[in-house]
Amino acid sequence: MKNFLARQKQEGFFSVRFKSAAGKLTAAQLLAIHELAEKFGAGFVNLTSRQEISVPFVREENFTAIEKFCTEHDLKLCPLGAVFKQVTACQGTQTCPSGVIDSPKIALELERQHGGRVLPNKITCAVTGCPNNCMKVDNNDIGVKGAVEPKFFADNCVYCGACAKVCRVGAIKIDRAKKIWTLDRDKCLNCGRCVKACKKLALRGEVGYKIYFSGKDFLPMIRAEERLYKIVDAALKYFSEHGKPRERFGKMLARLGTEEFTNVLK
Ligand code: SF4
Ligand code: SF4
Ligand code: SF4
């Protein structure tokens, strides 16, 4: 049975955590949590690093009443322990001018597919809308980052060098005299800065996803959203089959190496 009560250091007290929808809670849900914290807790909440709302100082004997309250007020409890944790997300294209992907949409779909899935150990997952990486996806077991692949259209290029100037990794080389523009795809971070810098429409960005496992990216930019979900599913299956009990995902990869894992994802 899934456990929803986190033991506190204060004898006899527990906290319960509530999910947000990729960081979003309605005003009605907030009011319900307010009521719940007054009724069953100590009248305050804590925000967790996983975009959950935690209500501390709850008594175990009130848990059945809390579950009933949740059903009546559209609140979802977060299971504890070795499960796929709530997926965190920034707002991406929904509100952020820098966003290149709809991070909450991706996070909610991953949550729908895997939320609460029992695994050898917990899995943390985050989605960030662009290479600015506000959600620090590399600090999670699985991280998804919005990415841009620059496409070059020679007919529009005036070889001004603005794109090369903004590239932080020197992936673009330009020979003005010979009118040669080159991109080193191995160096490219898919950040899209060059695309923004080009005022002549000689660079256009193809949007996709970079995926990270324990901070490392094994795969080139993913173009289709469906493929992203298949990769996450394959990674979790691999973890279920190969992870030892209580072993973290990164430890499993360190123990087994990444060659077989990368092949499973392809
Ligand atoms: S990661 Fe990008 S899209 Fe997400 S909040 Fe930060 S700047 Fe905006
Ligand atoms: S910024 Fe645009 S026009 Fe200028 S060199 Fe780069 S691709 Fe060409
Ligand atoms: S996408 Fe970013 S890293 Fe890649 S070439 Fe453009 S500026 Fe450089």
Image (cartoon, rainbow, N blue to C red):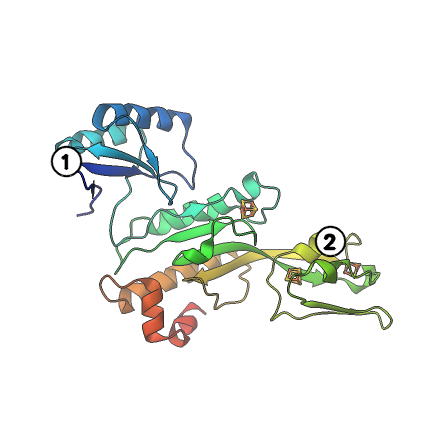
- Percent x, y for residue 59? 16, 33
Q: Quadrant of ligand 3?
A: bottom right
Hey, which quadrant is residue 96 in on the image? top right
Q: Is mark 2 within 8 Å of ligand 2?
A: yes
- Is residue 27 depicted above or below 4 in this figure? above
Corner quadrant of residue 187: bottom right
Q: Nearer the viewer, residue 209 or 225?
A: 209
Q: Amino acid at mark 2?
A: Ala
The residue tagged 2 is: 197
Contact? badges 1 and 2 (CB < 8 Å): no
- On screen, residue 246 versus residue 145, left or right, reads left
Identify the disc placed on residue 60. Answer: 1
Whichever of labels 1 and 2 marks the residue nearer the N terminus, that label is 1
Q: Which mark is residue 1?
A: none
At which x and y percent is residue 248? 30, 62
**Is disc 1 surrounded by few (<14), some (14 to 19) or many (20+) residues within 10 Å?**
some
Query: Residue at 53% of width from left, 49% of height from top?
Result: 129
Q: Callout 2: 10 Å neighbours few (<14), some, many (20+)?
A: some
